[in-house]
Image (spheres, grey):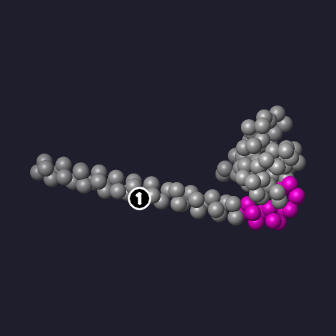
Amino acid sequence: MIRRLLEVHYLRHRADSNPIQQRFWLRELRTPGLLFEACALWPDLVKELIPERPLLRLARQGQTAEMEDALLAEERDERLRDRAYWMPLKVELEHLRQLAKESRNQTENGRQ
């Protein structure tokens, strides 16, 4: 879903874009063809952002198969980072849910 939203945003605004939007698209686009196009449109930004997103080098060079593999790896890594980020928060939420349940039980037992 996010990929499609990025595509629509890029296609709708690329002609009158500003550097903030251009940076955003170069960091976030997940569609090889659009990344190839964006890299051709803003080569100076690409050079600047390659250390942050190395697959831009592949896009700049038009390496389609390698780019698709790199995008899949990037997505996998992002999912792993998301999972690692949310794990302790899920544990904390479960702990808070248990505390709330115990508190309700104590309140109900106190009324009886």
Could you tell me the amino acid type at mark 1?
Val
Magenta span covers which residues? 59-72
Image: 22 above or below 65 = above
Secondary structure, magenta segment, majority class: helix
The answer to which quarter of the image holds residue 76 is: bottom right
Q: Is residue 34 left or right of residue 6?
A: right
Residue 46 image offset from top left, x and y in percent: 81, 48
Residue beneath label 1, please?
91
The answer to which quarter of the image holds residue 98 is: bottom left
Residue 61 visible within the image: yes
**Any magenta on residue 21?**
no
Residue 34 image offset from top left, x and y in percent: 82, 50
Q: Is residue 13 left or right of residue 104?
A: right
Residue 15 image offset from top left, x and y in percent: 84, 36
Residue at the spot 53% in from the left edge and 60% down from the top edge: 84
Residue at the spot 29% in from the left edge and 53% down from the top edge: 99
